Amino acid sequence: MDNIFDSFIENLVKECLQGAKFSYLLPREKNQLAKKLRDHFYDITIKLFLDQLSEQQFNEVKDLDFKEPTAQQKVAEISASIPGFAFVLEDKLKQEMDLILQTGQIAPD
């Protein structure tokens, strides 16, 4: 992991996997679940990000390949310009992690 956000997501995934609801899983199953959790947390992030954008900002990112470093840089710049976005995102992701730990289920997107 090369940035703070990726590290944060990985910590959420690890915390979920350590939950009582997932303690019975075999290592292979935990790896599969980790991928699902990671994808789920990234999906939440993207949806929340897009919901916060102005029309102009949306037009700036709509055609970006989010896996490209230049796109990631652009998203980081725009995210930083949205007041309180980091706090809202952190809160949303932690709430989702708590729900997963309580239910043992990943909510459909």
Image (cartoon, helix red, strand yellow):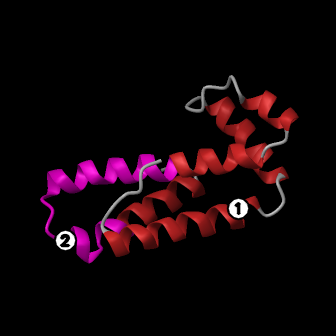
Crowding at label 1, few (<14), some or many (≥20) Cα neighbours within 10 Å? some
On whether residue 52 falls in the magenta region, the answer is: no
For this view, does 98 lie left or right of residue 94?
left
Name which residue lies at 52% across and 48% down: 42
Answer with mark 1 or mark 2, whichever residue precedes in sequence.
2
Name which residue lies at 33% across and 62% down: 105
For this view, does 91 lie left or right of residue 79?
left
Q: Which of 1 and 98 is in front in this view?
A: 98
Callout 2 amino acid: Ser
Above or below, 76 relative to 93: above
On whether residue 34 falls in the magenta region, the answer is: yes
Q: Tags 1 and 2 in contact by the CB under 8 Å rule? A: no
Position in image of residue 59 (x %, y %): 80, 28
| Residue located beneath label 2 in the image | 23
Magenta region: 15-42
Q: Residue 86 carries which label?
A: 1
Name which residue lies at 30% across and 67% down: 104
Above or below, 63 relative to 46: above
Q: Which mark is residue 5?
A: none
**Residue 20 makes an appearance in the image:** yes
Q: What element carries label 2?
A: loop
For this view, does 94 lie left or right of residue 52?
left
Position in image of residue 39 (x %, y %): 43, 46
Q: Nearer the viewer, residue 26 or 54?
A: 54
